[in-house]
């Protein structure tokens, strides 16, 4: 198991006081905090290496290019991609999924063909496909969840048809914490010649992910949820898929030759990285990966499972508190959505904030899921490698205080 106390010393923000109390940060599903090594790496880039990449032969340009491409190699190794060219840098998961929808979807999806999603999708993996369906006359079909917040293993086989061309699914729900059996679902999809897109925004930061083992066609995630800076995301795509896709964002760097009459586009990954790249952010993501690999993703996962088991057991003792999602930490990540009966989620968050505890409230960009759960909103506590059981005890204490204030 990891040494949490030692890890916490690497995160400057955890020494902050909020309303006179020690900060307890349980909003990791929204964004994670950053270790000193990431902050120093970004600062060092701007202080000592700042230049545009792939365009200059001067020393700073060559250094910046090497740092940027080294980070691409780190990402490829982190998710076990076959080659670094399969890694496309974007501004985040949302941009990555939109890239697939525009560059792959418009080329490959025709009227009356089907896309399969789930009711637990984040809006970023729902709205782009919804809009494409409106424009191209496509049909959207949804996998439903059962009472435990999971999808039945045989559900995909039941709704897939010869018209189905795409399965777009979250690896781990940002509300329920459900870890979907995507490897098995990808196998089913490929048996029917269905392309697969995986929203891994909540999984890549928290558990080992091997894209070659999964055999997914596309996979998207963000840097800021895995100790890196905001403004950088990743789209992984199989080389054969990326090479067939046209670019949809045009400008500098993504070109090979430009004439007044026509343009010849660059090879992957440059074809999809038009304009000035988020260089500092990519370099910072590389440093975040260094940090996570030093800890070990298996260790991160085991730590979060222990926290989740403990939190589920402690919160279940609070009368009137409803927890959504699986009760088994083997199939859920460190995300717990809940409500206190008779108390608005915003009121819960306010009382907890007064105790220095940061949680998330609202629909968490998953309105259809909340509709399915028949609730307008929920509270969400989400954990990461620097959280502790003692902090969960204080969360429980804060929730009991909330009940006293409002009930």
Image: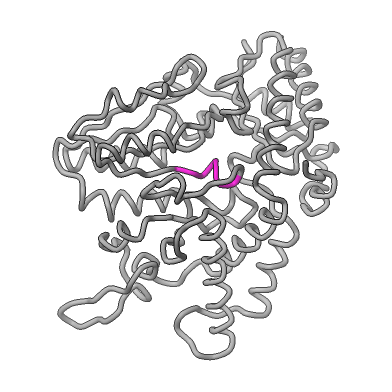
Residue 359 sits inside the magenta stretch: no
Q: Give above or below for 110 relative to 268.
A: above
What residue is shown at x 47% (from left), y 35% (from top)? 365
From the viewer's side, name the closer residue of 139 and 210.
Answer: 210
From the viewer's side, name the closer residue of 210 and 89.
Answer: 210
From the viewer's side, name the closer residue of 340 and 156.
Answer: 156
* Residue 123 percent location from the top left of the image: 41, 37
Which of the 4 image quarters holds residue 165?
Answer: top left
Residue at the bottom extreme of this rendering: 58
What residue is shown at x 42% (from left), y 43% (from top)? 198
**Is residue 376 shown left or right of residue 262?**
right
**Is residue 134 shown left or right of residue 214?**
left
* Residue 375 percent location from the top left of the image: 49, 17
* Residue 210 percent location from the top left of the image: 51, 49
Count all numbered tags in the image, as a single digit: 0
Dominant secondary structure, magenta = loop
Q: Give above or below for 305 relative to 14.
A: above
Q: Quadrant of the C terminus?
A: top right
What residue is shown at x 61% (from left), y 22% (from top)? 328
Q: Quadrant of the N terminus?
A: top right
Task: Give the extent of the magenta segment.
Answer: 199-205
* Residue 265 percent location from the top left of the image: 27, 73
Q: Give above or below for 363 relative to 237.
A: above
Which of the 4 image quarters holds residue 345?
Answer: top right
How has the structure been colored for display?
Answer: one colour
Q: Give above or below for 40 relative to 26.
A: below
Which of the 4 image quarters holds residue 301?
Answer: top right
**Is residue 258 shown left or right of residue 179?**
left
From the viewer's side, name the closer residue of 63 and 354.
Answer: 63
């Amino acid at each position: 198991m990891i040494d949490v106390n030692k890890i916490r010393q690497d995160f400057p923000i955890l020494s902050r006081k909020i309303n006179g109390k020690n900060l307890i940060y349980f909003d990791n599903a929204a964004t994670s905090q950053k270790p000193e090594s990431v902050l120093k790496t970004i600062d060092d880039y701007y202080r000592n290496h700042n230049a545009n990449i792939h365009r200059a032969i001067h020393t700073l340009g060559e250094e910046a290019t090497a740092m940027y491409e080294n980070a691409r190699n780190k990402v490829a190794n982190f998710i076990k991609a076959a080659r670094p060219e399969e890694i496309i840098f974007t501004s985040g998961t949302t941009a990555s999924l939109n890239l697939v929808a525009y560059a792959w979807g418009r080329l490959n999806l025709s009227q009356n063909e089907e896309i399969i999603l789930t009711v637990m999708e984040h809006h970023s993996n729902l709205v782009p496909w919804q809009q494409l369906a409106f424009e191209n006359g496509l049909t959207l079909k949804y996998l439903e969840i059962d009472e435990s917040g999971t999808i039945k293993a045989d559900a995909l086989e039941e709704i897939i048809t010869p018209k189905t061309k795409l399965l777009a699914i979250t690896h781990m729900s940002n509300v329920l914490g459900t870890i979907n059996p995507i490897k098995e679902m990808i196998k089913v999809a490929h048996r029917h010649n269905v392309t697969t897109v995986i929203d891994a925004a909540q999984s890549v930061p928290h558990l080992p992910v091997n894209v070659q083992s999964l055999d997914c066609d596309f996979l998207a995630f963000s840097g800021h949820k895995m100790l890196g800076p905001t403004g950088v995301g990743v789209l992984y795509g199989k080389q054969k898929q990326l090479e067939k896709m046209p670019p949809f964002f045009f400008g500098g760097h993504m070109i090979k030759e430009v004439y007044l009459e026509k343009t010849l586009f660059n090879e992957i990954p440059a074809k999809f990285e038009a304009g000035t790249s988020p260089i500092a952010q990519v370099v910072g993501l590389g440093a975040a990966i260094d940090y996570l690999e030093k800890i070990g993703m298996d260790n991160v996962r085991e730590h979060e499972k222990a926290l989740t088991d403990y939190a589920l057991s402690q919160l279940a003792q609070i009368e009137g508190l409803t927890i959504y999602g699986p009760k088994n930490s083997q199939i859920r990540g460190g995300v717990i959505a809940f409500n206190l009966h008779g108390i608005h989620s915003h009121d819960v968050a306010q009382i907890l904030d007064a105790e220095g505890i940061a949680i998330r409230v609202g629909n968490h960009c998953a309105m259809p899921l909340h509709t399915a759960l028949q609730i307008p909103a929920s509270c969400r506590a989400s954990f990461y490698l620097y959280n502790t059981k003692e902090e969960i005890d204080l969360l429980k204490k804060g929730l009991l205080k909330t009940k006293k204030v409002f009930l």
